[in-house]
Amino acid sequence: MVTIGTYDGVHYGHRRIMELVVDDARRRGVPAVVVTFDRHPLSLLRPGAEPLQLSSSSKQLELLEGLGIDLVYQMTFDRVRAEESPESFMEITLGQLLGANLVYVGEDFRFGRNRSGSFASLQKWASERSAQARAVPLFRVKERLGGEHVDAESVISSSLIRRYLEAGSIEDANGLLCRSHSTIGRVISGDHRGGGELGFPTANLELPPGLAVPHDGIYAGVLRRLDSGERYRAAISIGTRPTYYADGERLIESFVLDFSQDLYGVEVEVEYEAFLREQVRFSSSQELALQIHRDVDAVRRWFDAQDGR
């Protein structure tokens, strides 16, 4: 049982396809297999034009495993692969390598050199080999965010989720992802203002290259230690620290509530739950510290409201 796609972010539409693949695989007693690439094709075909990815390869694998996928075949996308004909891909990868007898794809699926292969190509190939190909209809925003949403009739896609992240609409992005969007990285040393000058020590992450990070601002969220799985509520700042730098490095800074342990060098995942405010430049450290107090209180109130639902 095989499905093919980039599956960036493993959003709601992707999950619906995975459900079909896993259900069919379990009924037939065969593995559920995802075929994908190790990079976005545009990174090779038009370097610099490729979109920021919603999930790293490791996060994508974790998500797919959590949905019951047994095997992920991650193909290297190189010049040879880019020039491969749809017929060659179907015969060698799907036929000889995977022995696929049922293939699921999205109804807009394209593949092969110059995206010349389509679902019709796949269906024809399958029918000639006593196999099957099934196209899954596209899903719309209203199915997750309701019919009153401004984008209700839009197709759920990775590009739409990236647009929400860029706008700071984290709740909408999370709704389509069916999880909290997150960033994984190792805690690094900052400029040490947080613990001394401001009174709010933070766990700092550099922005990961090539991955989508939400709009600059303050968020309520969670910091998860990857070594232990422990989860802590946090006030999260994404931005360039404009109070101190005219053109500062963009960082993710998490003040972990009610926490005093040393996290330097620890690999963590920062999950964004709610957008609270825009990044602002303050006239002094004292003014910034007062605002951080307000932000931390706002984060506590947000979590209290979630607990009271």
Image: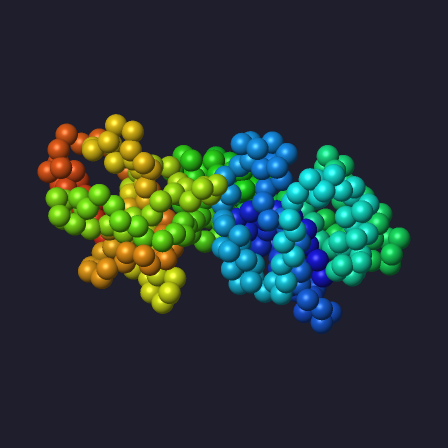
Q: Is residue 216 left or right of residue 87?
A: left
* Residue lying furthest left: 286
Q: Please report the residue visible at 54 percent of the width from the left and 42 percent of the height from the top.
A: 158
Q: Where is residue 192 in the image (x, y as percent from the top left)?
A: 19, 46
The answer to whether residue 239 shows anywhere in this view is yes
Q: Position of residue 3 (x, y in %)?
A: 68, 54
Q: Position of residue 73 (x, y in %)?
A: 65, 57
Give the colour scheme shown.
Answer: rainbow
Q: Please report the residue visible at 37 percent of the width from the left and 65 percent of the height from the top.
A: 227
Residue 286 quadrant? top left
The answer to whether residue 302 shows anywhere in this view is no
* Residue lying furthest top: 246
Q: Please report the residue visible at 58 percent of the width from the left and 45 percent of the height from the top.
A: 39
Q: Quadrant of the C terminus?
A: bottom left
Q: In this view, does 256 lie to the left or right of 181?
A: left
Front one among 72 and 137: 72
Q: Position of residue 265 (x, y in %)?
A: 32, 57
* Residue lying furthest right: 128
Front one among 142 and 103: 103
* Residue lying furthest bottom: 29
Q: Is residue 250 left or right of residue 295?
A: right
Q: Is residue 306 left or right of residue 169?
A: left
Q: Please report the residue visible at 79 percent of the width from the left and 53 percent of the height from the top.
A: 92
Q: Quadrant of the N terminus?
A: bottom right
Front one among 86 and 249: 249
